[in-house]
Image (cartoon, rainbow, N blue to C red):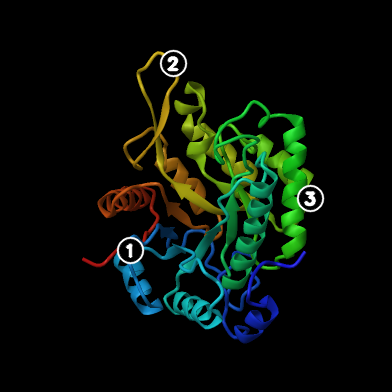
Amino acid sequence: MKIPTALSRRRFLSAAASVPFLAGSGEGKEPPPGPGALMRLGGPVQQKYSSPEEWVALVQGLGYNAVYCPVADARDESLLRAYVEAARKANLVIAETGAWSNPMAPDPEERKKALEKCKAQLDLAERVGARCCVNISGNRGNPWAGNHPLNLTGETFNMIVEITRSILDAVRPTRTYYALETMPWSYPDTVDSYLRLIKAIDRKRFAAHMDPVNLVSNPQLYFRTADLLRDGFKKLGPYIKSCHAKDIILSQKQNVHLDEILPGQGNLDYRVYLQELRKLNDVPLMIEHLRTPEEYRQAADHIRKTAGEVGWAAPTGRS
């Protein structure tokens, strides 16, 4: 199937052949630092920018050395190349492109559009050298990221396998990866179901994305996040290409009610999270889902402080 993009990947990669891309495959000219080096911390840039230079200045001002893909419209080849080169010069890892959509949507037209988006975003990740392209597996109903009684069934597991294979086989990436974010009501919903998917999909360029908050689905896991993290990194570590940073809190309501919250204000054991993440090879940790620049600053400060407590140097912003 033809990738829906106006830019030929072959032409782009040929023109950018001199650039040591930042993909996590280790295929660039300069291999990434090993475990124990400066942590890779990133988040969104909420301020507006109009050039690669402005973007880099904003990223560095926030104290990030990992970034989400800065270009949504990939039709401008020269602009895309300029952002890739700016990231390279500033030692910024492009952690992720997002393919947020529902490739299992009940409506055929929505499902078709979602599949095309997944392929286009994986192709974009390949071209900019992102560590991975991330999506959820989807939802058998609506909304796109919601729950449905069929989501956690053998039939749906098999659908995910076939859908993911079709995305990877259409794009055939060589230096980036396609990954699924864990969700409490869709596969992969546990560390073990993620391993089952990796084995069943059986594609070298299918990888893991670690979002431990999305694995906390009951009080037993909530009060044992250290064990959850150690188990997750032990089993998925070789496959993890990018991670998300947020936190979770359990309310005192009678029925179980779990909410995302700013890192440091919930029950996720960030000391263990960073200790385990540090063992991997230069994997980025990306803050997400906050509302204001101040909230992102607080989250980053908590992560930097905790990193220092476990002996890991973290990037800092400009005063």
Label 1 or label 2, whichever lies nearer to me, is: 2
**Farthest left residue in view:** 319
**Farthest top residue in view:** 254
The crowding category of the residue bearing disc 2, from other C-alpha atoms within 10 Å (few below 14, some 14 to 19, many at least 20), is few
Image quadrant occupied by the N terminus = bottom right
Judging by the rendered image, the residue that carries numbered circle 3 is 202
Label 2 or label 3, whichever lies nearer to me, is: 2
**For marks 3 and 1 on the same chain, the one whose residue lies earlier in the sequence:** 1
Instruction: Name which residue type carries label 2.
Output: Asn
Q: Secondary structure at mark 3?
A: loop
Judging by the rendered image, the residue that carries numbered circle 2 is 255
Q: Quadrant of residue 150?
A: top right
Q: Residue at x 57, y 62 (%)?
A: 131
Q: Position of residue 124 (x, y in %)?
A: 60, 67
Front-most of residues 75 and 312: 75
Judging by the rendered image, the residue that carries numbered circle 1 is 63
